[in-house]
């Protein structure tokens, strides 16, 4: 594991508990770094069928995977996992190639997987011995892998490991003053939604939100594309620990009905600053709306959204209509930077809840 990855895992897990032997304990943690190995010999891939006794994703096919629970080189962790789970020794391995990290969120089990895909090429087929985590293992032709009942997320990891997919990138954001933020974004046809251009944009937008960890939504105009598309990525935070994770893509969204009266809600925007330079203010928003939109497969949805989901949806729809949150502020005395917002609003809110 390169120094930057060691630093990343160290920073992510610095507050996590440790087992008595010093390994990192991920039992009750949401964000978990893991390695997932695609082990290859000639044109075959080694797959393991997970035991019914494992906590996450039992009885599915997977590569050889494990938590990064020690701060040591990733290649060393890969070799350790292969030996422990399959009895594959160092002498069996020709080379190990670690790919760029991908983030996979599973709201059902409240996990945010930081996956490091690894391609492991073997010199020969060793005699395999599985441990308690895997019921059995088998060699599968590479062309047949994606047709199996795979563990959630393994298909993406497998394709990344073998270099079959493009690695998403962090997009550069536009800021207040850029004319694109004042345009009415162009609506997309179903054919355009299915195109590689739009699918790549969606992947990059989600990757940007997850990796930068700024905001709970991102509109295409905020990354320089004037199309009617936003991604929403709501998750629990130290300030809002009770939030239910919610991720979706909204394309050509329309608010078709509102309920009740608007109420003043705190809001910010990454296009007017990032981190401590972010600007906040109170904005009148509905607590409940009915939203109609297309998803990334061009399937139409119409749902009633409440609370944080409704709040974020209104902010994103405004972006696609060329409206910024500052346009809706009625009480200009509420404008404040993040440092003051955290001191006066966030901390005050914590105090009132004690």
Image (cartoon, rainbow, N blue to C red):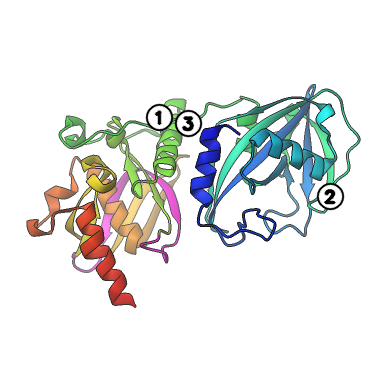
Of labels 2 and 3, earlier in sequence is 2
* Label 1–label 3 contact, CB within 8 A: no
How packed mark 2 is, by other alpha carbons closer than 10 Å (few <14, some 14-19, many 20 or more), is some
Residue 178 in the figure: left or right of residue 225? left
Is label 1 in a helix, a strand or a loop? helix
Is label 2 in a helix, a strand or a loop? loop
> Does residue 344 appear in the picture of this structure?
yes
Q: Mark 2 to mark 3: distance in Å? A: 34 Å
* Label 2–label 3 contact, CB within 8 A: no
Against 164, residue 310 (above or below) is below
Residue 208 in the figure: left or right of residue 88? left
Numbered tag placed on residue 131 in the rendering: 2
The percent position of residue 335, horizontal first and vertical second, equals 13, 54
Residue underneath mark 3: 168
Is label 3 in a helix, a strand or a loop? loop
Q: Disc 2 or disc 1, which is closer to the eye?
A: 2
| Range of residues picked out in magenta | 238-263
* Label 2–label 1 contact, CB within 8 A: no
Residue 261 in the figure: left or right of residue 191? left
Of labels 2 and 1, earlier in sequence is 2
In the foreground, 53 or 84 = 84
User: Residue at left 48%, top 31%?
Assistant: 168
Against 102, residue 289 (above or below) is below
Residue situated furthest bottom in the rendering: 354
In the foreground, 130 or 325 = 130
Residue underneath mark 1: 192
The percent position of residue 299, horizontal first and vertical second, equals 45, 44
């Amino acid at each position: 594991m390169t120094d930057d990855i060691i630093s990343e895992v160290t920073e992510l897990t610095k507050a996590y508990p440790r087992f008595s032997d010093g390994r990192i304990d991920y039992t009750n943690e949401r964000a978990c770094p893991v390695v997932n190995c695609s082990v290859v010999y000639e044109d075959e891939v080694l797959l393991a069928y997970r035991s019914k006794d494992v906590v996450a994703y039992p009885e599915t096919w997977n590569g050889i995977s494990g938590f990064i629970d020690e701060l040591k080189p990733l290649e060393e962790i890969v070799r350790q996992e292969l030996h422990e789970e399959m009895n594959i020794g160092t002498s069996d391995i020709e080379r190990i190639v670690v790919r760029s990290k991908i983030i996979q969120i599973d709201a059902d089990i409240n996990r945010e997987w930081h996956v490091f895909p690894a391609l492991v090429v073997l010199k020969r087929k060793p005699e395999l011995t599985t441990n308690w985590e895997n019921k059995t293992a088998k060699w599968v032709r590479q062309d047949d892998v994606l047709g199996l009942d795979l563990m959630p997320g393994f298909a993406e990891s497998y394709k990344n490991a073998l270099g079959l997919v493009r690695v998403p990138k962090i997009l550069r954001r536009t800021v207040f003053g850029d004319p694109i933020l004042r345009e009415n974004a162009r609506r997309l046809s179903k054919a355009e939604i299915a195109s590689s251009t739009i699918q790549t944009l969606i992947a990059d937008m989600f990757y940007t939100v997850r990796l930068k960890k700024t905001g709970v939504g991102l509109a295409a105009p905020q990354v320089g594309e004037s199309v009617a598309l936003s991604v929403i990525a709501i998750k629990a935070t130290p300030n809002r620990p009770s939030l239910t994770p919610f991720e979706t893509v909204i394309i050509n969204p329309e608010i078709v009905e509102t309920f009740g009266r608007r109420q003043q809600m705190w809001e910010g925007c990454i296009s007017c600053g990032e981190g401590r330079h972010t600007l906040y203010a109170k904005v009148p928003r509905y607590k409940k709306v009915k939203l109609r939109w297309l998803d990334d497969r061009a399937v139409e949805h119409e749902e009633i959204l409440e609370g944080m989901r409704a709040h974020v949806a209104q902010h994103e729809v405004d972006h696609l209509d060329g409206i910024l949150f500052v346009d809706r502020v009625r009480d200009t005395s509420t404008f404040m930077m993040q440092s003051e917002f955290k001191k006066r609003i966030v901390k005050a809110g914590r105090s009132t809840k004690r």
